Image (cartoon, helix red, strand yellow):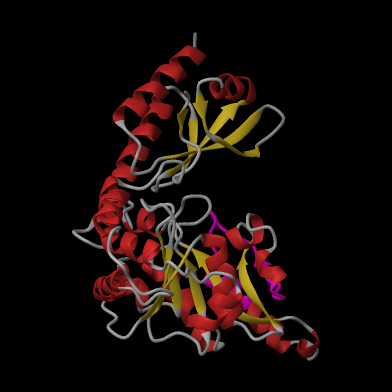
Amino acid sequence: MKISFESDYNNGAHPEVICHLLETNGKQSQSYGFDEWSEKARDKIRDACKCPNADIFFLVGGTQTNATVIDALLPSYAGVVAATTAHINVHESGAVEASGHKVITLPQEDGKLTADSLSTYLAAFHADPTWEHMVQPGMTYITFPTELGTIYSTSEIKAIYEVCRRYKIPLFIDGARLGYGLAADGCDIDFPWLAHHCDAFYIGGTKVGALCGEAVVFPTGAPRGFFTQVKRHGALLAKSRLAGVQFDALFTDGLYLRISAHAIEMAMQLRDIFREAGFVLRPSPTNQQFVELPNEQMHALMQQILFETWEPIDAHRTLCRFVTSWATTSQDLECMRSALKTLQK
């Protein structure tokens, strides 16, 4: 069987999560988010974020979460502003548009939306005398980390949030890989800071050690009717304990950030292996590493290793993505090292 660096959700759940699922399996519970483990997980997340009044909801996956939150925060006539590389614009099959909201894209820099471009766009929009004939920008969306594995600094997010507050639109942060951003070298953001510099964000579980599940956090309270919106989107788990038990485990003894730190340690070693073999990588301090591969070597490596082709660079080279997770081992890295050596013979 090939070693896989294709994604961070191609294994099951972290053993500590599985153990907690087994330990609680024989117990009965309430449903629809009112089970005891969901309540425990909410309390632990509130404590981690230093937001005692936060409303927290557990959904199943990232696309479902993005579509539900965006639809709940936007009026029917408004759209969401995002970078051209944003997940909601590129890899979610029009899920946001399916709910009637346009994704309004702005240029990206290293995968990031900038406060300057957001401010310039919003100022121009509101200065246009025909603005009422247009899709109105009703919120801003960013991912942390970005689709390119880069991370925002506190100053960058603070500047974006200040623009949003000036124009009275909410800032929503997609945290499908949040742990890998928070644990990255050079990151100056933590849970409490993030929770106080946006209107909504979610803590990704699916890509950070859970079987499935995302925890949506509204630091100062959810919009009216959000529970109903969740159900309307088919996102309400009857067996809510499935997510609750997992997040209860992830936020016990720092497991969420321990998982993230391990994946990043493996990613940095993977980065060094590629560099030692003479390959060029794009900058990324997170668990996603982007490597420029000559097409001939890319196809040869595919015979031994699973990974994702990201985009063509030119006629002869392709940018490829290699991702680590809680399940990545030193043995996996040695397999990669050996596979790269065969390419050079």
In magenta stretch: residue 116:
yes
Q: Residue at x 43, y 64 (%)?
A: 214
* Residue ranking furthest to the left: 253
Give the residue drawn at x 45%, y 76%. Answer: 200
Q: Is residue 140 left or right of residue 152?
A: right
Q: Picture coordinates of residue 220 (x, y %)?
A: 38, 86
> Residue 87, how many percent across, how many down?
58, 58
Image vertical order of residue 311 relative to residue 316, above or below: below
Question: Residue 95: where, in percent of width, then height?
Answer: 66, 65
- Which of 302 and 117 lies nearest the eye of the viewer? 302
Q: Position of residue 31 (x, y in %)?
A: 40, 73
Instruction: Name the residue: 55% across, 76% down.
Output: 231
| Residue 6 visible in the shown view | yes
Residues in magenta, as a range: 99-120
Placement of 283 over or under 203, stated as above or below: above
Q: Is residue 104 visible?
A: no
Q: Is residue 230 above or below residue 261?
A: below
